[in-house]
Amino acid sequence: MKMSKAEGCIAVIGCNNCGKCDNICPYGALQRRAGKVSIDHSRCTVCMKCINVCPVKALVYVD
């Protein structure tokens, strides 16, 4: 099930390029661009796995 706009989204704020979230998303929504993480919102289901693994809380849920 894909997320709808009403459900919110994941935003990337302050990624320090630690690599802990690499390959954590079961839907392939996390991508690296210029060494930083970006989210492909068309693939994101807001499963929160990336948020739970981020040690600096750079991945945040936005309602």
Image (tube, rainbow, N blue to C red):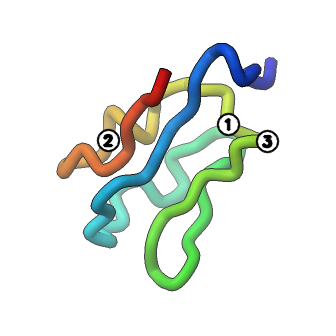
Q: Amino acid at mark 2?
A: Val
> Would residue 46 appear left or right of 56 to someone viewing this image?
right
Badge 3 marks a residue whose secondary structure is: loop
Residue placed at 46% from the left, 29% from the top?
Answer: 62
40 relative to 22, above or below: above
Q: Are marks 2 and 1 in contact (CB under 8 Å)?
A: no
Distance, label 3 to label 2, CA atoms, is 21 Å
Residue 1 x %, y %: 80, 18
Residue placed at 32% from the left, 41% from the top?
Answer: 53
Where does label 1 land, which residue?
44
Q: Amino acid at mark 3?
A: Ser
Residue 12 x %, y %: 43, 52
Badge 1 marks a residue whose secondary structure is: loop
Q: Report the residue that reaches farthest toward the bottom.
A: 34
> Would residue 4 appear left or right of 14 to someone viewing this image?
right
Q: Earlier in the sequence, mark 2 or mark 1?
A: 1
Residue 11 x %, y %: 47, 44
**Image quarter for residue 50?**
top left
How many numbered circles are shown? 3
Q: Are marks 3 and 1 in contact (CB under 8 Å)?
A: yes
Comparing labels 3 and 2, the label whose residue is closer to the camera: 3
What is the crowding at mark 3: few (fewer than 14 residues within 10 Å), some, or many (at least 20)? few
Distance, label 2 to label 1, CA atoms, is 16 Å
In this view of the protein, which residue sits in the foreground, 33 or 53?
33
**Image quarter for residue 3?**
top right
Where does label 2 land, which residue?
53
What is the crowding at mark 2: few (fewer than 14 residues within 10 Å), some, or many (at least 20)? some
Q: Amino acid at mark 1?
A: Cys
Where does label 3 land, which residue?
42
